[in-house]
Amino acid sequence: MDDERLPTRTYILSLAAVLLVALALRAARFGEVPPGLYHDEAYNGIDALAVLQGERPLWFPANNGREPLFIYLVALSVRLFGRSAEALRAPALLLGLLTVPAAAFMGTSLFGRRVGLLTAAVTAVTFWPVHLSRLGFRVVSLPLFVALALGFLWRGLRSGRRRDYLLAGALYGASFYTYLAARFTPLPLLLLVGLLAWPAARLPRPSWKGLLTSAAAAAIVVVPLAITLARQPQGLGLRIGQVSVFSPAISHGDPWGTLARHLWRTAQAIFIRGDRIPRHNLPWRPIFELGLAAAFILGTVVALRRRGAGWFVLVWAGTMLLPTVLAEDAPHFLRAVGVQPVLFVLPALGLDALWRGLESLGIRWGRPLAGYRLGAAAAVLVLTGGLVSTARDYFGAYAHSPTVYYHFETACRELAERLNGFLEAEAPGSRRVVYVSSRLWEQWPALRFLVPASDRVRAISPGSPPAPDDAAEVLLVFQPGEEYLPSLSLLPPGTRIAVTSDLYEQGDLEPQPRPYAIVLSATADAGTLEPIASLEHGLDLLEAGARRIAPDRLRVLLVWKASEQLSVDYVTFAQVLRGQTMIGQKDGPPAAGYVPSSRWRPGDRIVDEREVTLEAPLDPASDRLIVGLYDRATMARLHVLSSRVPVRDDAIPVGIE
C-alpha cells in the first residue's frame, strides 16, 4: 500500500478530473454514435415497457434470455425520458461512468491510491469501456459490480471488518443479475481462497469467518434468481450451448484445435488484434494502443513479482477471459467483459512502476520533487495518448463507418423517426394513420419500441389490407418483395402520393446492402392550379424541376395528376440532350414503379423522382432536359395537348438549377 504517497486532496481532485474526461468521452454525441438501435438493445426496451405495465420478472426469456438489473434501469429511464434510443442507452452511460470511481476504489484496495487512480484513468480513456457506456447492452453493468465487490473484499481482507465482507458478498451476489459472464466468477474466487491458504502467495491473513459472511450474503442475494432459473433450465443453458466451441456447429469437429486458436486470438486482443464485430469494437482494434500496451506488459511483470494482489489480478484476468475463449467469434468483447476493470489494473501497475522509477532517479539526483513530477508527467502523457487514440478512433473512423451504420440496424431507427415525425406533424382536424407490414413490425423490435402501437399505428398484411377508414393522410410501409398493391386502397384519394425507398440494411453475412423498407406517403396537397402541360388520357404535369447533385448527375422531380382512370402502366422518360446528342437518360415507371399508372385514381398527385447520370459534366449553357410519358408496349409518347412551355416531339423541357 502507498496511500501516503498521494494526499487525499490530490487524490480527490485527480479523480474528479478523470471523471470529467470519462464523462466527456461517454456523453459526446450520445445517442448519435453509434447510430441506430440494434435489436438486442430494442428487446431490452420492449421488456422495460412490460415492466412499466406491471410485470416484475427476475429473468426475461426473450432473445435467448437476459438478466433483469439492466432492464429495470431501462424501465426507469424510459419512464423519465420517454421511448427513445437515448433513454434506452442512458443507464449504460450511468453505469459506465460509475465504473470509473469503482475502479479507483478497487485499485486502491488492492495496491493503494496511486494505482487506484491510474486504474480509474485507464478505465476512463480506453475505447472498450467507453463504447460499452454508449450502448443499451446489459453487459456494461457487470464491471461495476465486479469492481465494487472486489474492492470491498480486498478491503475486508486488509481490515478484517465484517461490514466490508458483508458488502463484498452482497454486491457479488448482485453481479449475477447483470450478465451471463458473471457465472464464471466463482472460479477465480475459488482460486483466491486457495491463494489465501498458501503462505507463499503473501496475501493478507484472512478472516475465515468474514469470508463465510461474504459467501452467505452472496447466496442470499442470488437465491431468488437461482430459483427462477431452476424452474426454466432450458433458458439457463440455451445461449451457452449455441456458442460453445464444443458444439459441432462451431468447432466443425475440431474442438481442441478451435480452443487453441481461440486462446491465441484472445491473447492477441490485448494489443495486437481485437474483436472484429462492429457492434463491439472498431473492427480489429486491440484493447490498448501502443503506450498503454507497453504499460500493460510492464504491469504484468510487476504483478508476477508482487505476488499477493498481483497474482490475484492475473488469475482473475486469465479466468474471466474464458467466456470468450470457450465460445465462437473469439475475441468477443461482450463475453469477455467480466475481465473489466481488473484488466485495467495491469497497465496502471505499469504506469505506477514507471512513476516510481522516475521518482527513484530524482531521489538519486537529489531532486525528489522533480522526479515525482516527472513520473506524474510520464503517466499523464501515456494516458493522454490513450485518450487521443480513443477519441480519434471513436468519433472519427468508428462514427463514420458504413459497416457500423448497418450493424446497428440504423435504417430501422430512421424509419421509426420518420413514422413518429409524420404522426407528430398532424394538423388540427386532419387525422393521420400509419400502416406497417406485420412482418416488418414483428421482425424489427426497435420499430415496436420506438413507435408506440395505437389506433394510429397499425400492423397489417399488405396483401390483404383492412377496409380504408377516414384518415386524411396515410403512410404505408412494407418490405421489398411483399405483395402490397391491394393496400394502395388505404391511401386517401386526391392526395399527394410519394414513394421513399432510400433506407438500406445489410446483414452480418451479406455482401451488399439491400433496401430495408418501402414507404408510400399520401399527404394533403392543394397542388398547382394550372398544369405545366396537359397530356392525352387526362394526365397533367403539375410540377417539374431538376438540380445538380454532382457534376455529372441530376435529380429530377415531377408531379403527375390523373383526372380519369387509366388502363395502361405508362413509363416516364427523362433525357439530357447536348445539341441533338443524348448524354443522359433515365426511363422508368413513375414513383419507382410502386404506384403504377393503372392504379392512379382521379385527383391523385403522383410524385415521380429519378436520378439521371450523364456521360460528361453538365454544361448549363448548352444542355437541356426533356421529360414525358410513353406506352412501353408501343413505345409511342403520349401527346402533349397543351403546355405553358414550348414543346417539341411531345417532350416537355424542364429547367435545371
Image (tube, helix red, strand yellow):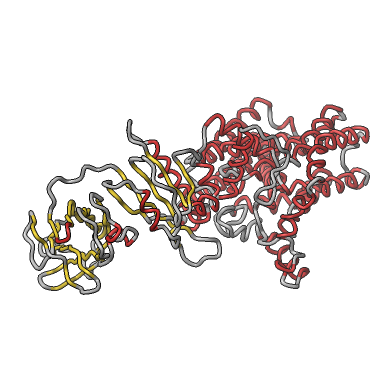
Question: Residue 409 versus residue 168: which sits nearer the camera?
Answer: 409
Q: Is 619 located above or below residue 470 in the figure?
A: below
Seen in the picture, residue 11 relative to 452 is either above or below; the reply is above
Please tell me which residue is depicted at 23% across the width and 61% down the height of the picture: 551
Question: Which quadrant would the C terminus be assigned to in this image?
Answer: bottom left
Residue 358 higher or lower than 572, as above or below:
above
Question: Left or right: 602 with respect to 346?
Answer: left
**164, above or below 134, in the image:** above
In percent of width and height, residue 612 lies at 25, 64
Horizontally, is 20 left or right of 604 in the view? Answer: right
Question: Residue 449 is drawn in which quadrant?
Answer: top right
Q: Foreground residue, 52 or 114? A: 52
Residue drawn at x 33%, y 35% is 430
Q: Nearer the viewer, residue 162 or 57?
A: 57
How many callouts does the rendering have? 0
Q: Position of residue 516 (x, y in %)?
A: 45, 57
Residue 458, image x, y percentages: 47, 44
Residue occupying image coordinates x 20% and y 45% = 527
The reply, left or right, for residue 91 in relation to residue 418 is: right
Which quadrant of the figure has residue 425?
top left
Residue 48 position in % (x across, y down): 61, 38
Give the quadrant of the N terminus.
top right
Name the residue furthest top. 9
Task: Let me know if residue 78 appears in the view.
Answer: yes
